[in-house]
Every structure is written in structure tokens, then in C-alpha cells.
Amino acid sequence: MAPARDRRTGFSRRRQFGIFAGYVLSVAGAVVALVLLTVSALNPSAFAGARTGAAGLFAPASALLASAAAAVATVPDAVSSHFGVRAENARLRAEAVRMRRLATRARGLQYENARLRRLLALRDREGAPVATARLVSSSLSSVRRFAVLNAGRWQGVRPGMPVRGPDGLIGRVLEAGPTAARVLLLTDAESLVPVRRTRDGLPAVVVGRGDGTVDVRSVNATDVTFRAGDLFVTTGTGGLYAPGIPVATVPRPGRDVVRGRTVASADTLDYAVVEPPFFPIPASPLALPAPAPAAPSPTSPAPAR
Amino acid sequence: MNSLDYRPFAPQLPPGRARALPWLTVAAGSLATLAPAVAPVPVLPPLGLLMLLSWRLLARHSLRPWAPAALGLFDDLLSGQPMGSAALGWSLCFLTMELVERGPTVRAFWQDWALAAALIVPALVLARFLAAPAGAELALPLAGQVAVSVLAFPACAWIVGWIDRRRNYA
């Protein structure tokens, strides 16, 4: 490559100063960036407004692309279903017979469960979903795992609300703008969800690794064995996630800390449901009836930040 | 451009538009994160940075010295990195290039590519440590992204060269 036409100064004082000012501005830009970094390290939500504003500005474009991709994705499905419909019919009939037995049993259990719960006068908080929207894009070029939700404050979405898919937990809302919100996915390195094992209620935490998988760490107990296929659901500890939402499974057996897979895979082709926090934090500490400064016990790990 | 491509009477883009084109292509590279996909790992190279380096290496004076700070801030708004991380990394890339170009400025393409790789790798490592806690085990996703980014540079350089030839203005 030949050298580009030079920005030569010659003897012109004006041009010399112009070039010099350019370099001063360049270093000043780096210094401003350092200041911004320091501010965002001290207060991570400092620029939430600007970020979610930009996300809201561009989310409609992503949503349009996502619906186009969804339309394209239906084509192979339609083709394969056209050819496989007979075999699928037979398979589904057999499955329906099997499921009928299970459903009868489940209905009985559900009735019994409802009766026992009434007996206990258990107070459940099951709020109606706040919003249902698509995750339209994600941080594709960053090591952080964020997704952009195509709904914001105008739809009632607030920071801290849990986000779940049809299968299980996806993450929680980190920042909410007027029309878009940023969701911290379970696989992010700073995500932490208190869970329990469905089999025996063993307490654990699901910590994101940043590479698409999660770590399942046992809490409060050592020498814990995880079996392949163990399912972990939310506990409700910390008041953020309602109890009983599937979070992660363990594909391979291990001890104390094992690699897990999230149950729900966040996908732009599917809808995400934003739910109200299980037990919302009171607006001010003075509003609490009895302020109990209890130290966090090891059985109740801190909620995901 | 070589002497065969030299067409002194060809219609030129108006200077304003010719100067805006590098800015627009870098911003378009930053907008690539709008692709409708939720990826488990960083699959996309930092296309804004690749475009910026391509302009810097192929057409030295196409962007002002303070352009990386402004374009980096725009990238930070969309990438999910903490605010200022791209602005800092990209500015440091430009300042490093000024130091490199105190030597000879005539380079072959593979030298451009090596230079770009030598800037992309530290920029990505810096971005990783600014975004996530140091203890997180992100070495593997990062290595993958570095490889994809270095391999994607020639494609970006091709696009930038194509645009630069057409804007016909240095």
C-alpha cells in the first residue's frame, strides 16, 4: 500500500495547531473513557438510561429481523411435518395413551396438594405476568451475557423482575428503559440464583460461567454428590424469584461443584415472560414493621444482584 | 490506489459525504450486535473495532485522531460492555498506531493484518477484564473470539478498501 496523502503541516501555523489539537483531543478522549469506566465500576447502573435508550431505539429493528428469521425458520418445519405427519400421528396416539394415565394421577395429586395447602393456610404470591415480549438481541460481541427485551417501563417492566421462558428461568431484568430492557442471563459470570434440588431439597446456587453453561455449587454442605439428571428449581430465597421455577439440570455426575445446563435456552424465536418479584423489597427500610438486623444465615444465600 | 485506477476526471463524492463514510461504516459495524440471536458465547468479532482498524491501516487520514473515542462510546451503548471500555481500547489502538507509524508507513497487506492482530488481541483482553470479574473462567470464549476476529480482518479490510476506492477521496 502506498502511503496515503499526508496531512502535512508545512510552515502553516494554523495546520500545525490543528494537528496538535487533534492529538490533544485523542488523549482527552482516552482520559474521558477512563473516567467513565471508573464511574461505571463504582455505580454499574450509572449509564443505564443512555444504554436502555439506545436499546429501545434499535430494538424495533432487531424485532423486525427476529420476526423475519422466525418466518424463515418455519419453512423447514413445515416441509418436514408435511412428510412426517403419518409417523407423527401414530407416535402421538401412543403418547396420548401413556399420558392419560399420568394426567389422571397428576390431577389427583393436584387436588390433594391444593387441599393440603389450604390446610396449612399457606400464603402464596403468584402475581400475573407483567409483560410478555421477545428477547430481540443479545451482547454478541461481549463476554458479558445480556439480552435485550422488547418491552420496558411503559409496559410495566422494572429492574429486578424475573424473566422466564416456557421451560424455565431465563434471567432477570437489570436495566429498564421506556420501550426496552436489558436482561442479565443465567449464564452471565455475575449471575447467581439460589436453588434447591427437586429430589431432596438440597440447597445450592447456580452461578453463571460466561461460556453458555452454569456451575451448580452446593451450599452449606460438603461432600455432596450430584447425579446426572438432577433438576434444580428456584427456592424463593431472597424474594426475587418465585419458588419452583426450573433453573438448571446436571448432565454429568460430580461432587460439590458441577457443570450444569440451564433448562430454558434463551432464544429470539420464543417469548419471554416478565413476572413481578416474588416478595418485592419494601420501598424504604422504615416501612418495615419490625426491622430485624439478622445476619444472613448460610442456608439463605444472598439473592442474585 | 495504483496508477491504473487513477482517474482524475471521474466524478467525486462531495467531500462531506466522503468524510462521513468511514464514520458510518464503523457505526454500522457496532450495530452488528442488533442481529436477532441470543448467543451463549461471544460469537461475533467486535466489527466496529475491525472496521476502525481497517480504515486506520488502509486510509491513514480518513478518520480524525479523536474519532475512536466518539465511535467507541457509541459502541459501548450497544455492546453490553461497561461504558468507556471500547472508547478507551480503541483510543489506545489509535495512539499505538501513531507510534508504529513513526517508522516506515509503506506496508504490504499481510503486515497490515499482523498489525491489526497485534492490536485486536490486547483490545479484546482489555475489554474482557473491564467487563467481567478477573476470576471468571472466560479464557476459552475469549480465545474463540480472538481467533474469529483475527480471521475476520481481511473481510473487513476488503469492504473498507472497496468503499475507499469508490469514495475516491483521501
Image: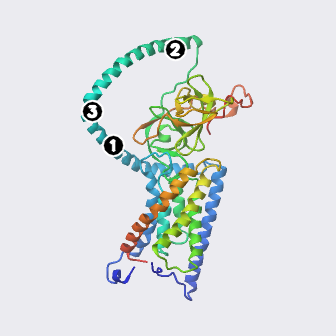
- Which residue does the image show at 43% across and 64% down from the upper left? B156
Please tell me which residue lies in front, B19 or A4: A4
Q: What type is the residue that disc 3 sits on? A: Gly
Q: Looking at the picture, do discs 1 and 2 lie on one chain?
A: yes
First in sequence, mark 3 or 1: give its number. Answer: 1
Give percent across and percent down for residue B17.
Answer: 40, 71
Instruction: Specify the subunit that label 1 lies on.
Output: A
Sequence-earlier tag: 1 or 2? 1
Report the mark closest to the observer, 3 or 1.
Answer: 3
Are labels 3 and 1 on one chain? yes
At label 1, the amino acid type is Ala
The image position of residue B44, as x and y in percent, is 47, 54
Say whether residue B84 is visible. no
Q: Give amino acid for label 2.
A: Asn
Q: Which residue is mark 1?
A: A73
Inter-mark Cα distance, 1 to 2: 41 Å
Residue at horizontal 56%, vertical 61%? B121
Which residue is painted at 43% across and 68% down in the image? B157
Residue A108, position in %: x, y? 46, 12
Task: Decide: few, some or many residues near mark 2? Use Cα within 10 Å; few <14, some 14-19, many ≥20.
Answer: few
Provide the residue designation for mark 3: A84
Left or right, A297 with respect to A198, comes to: right
Query: Which of the 4 quarters of the picture holds residue A121?
Result: top right
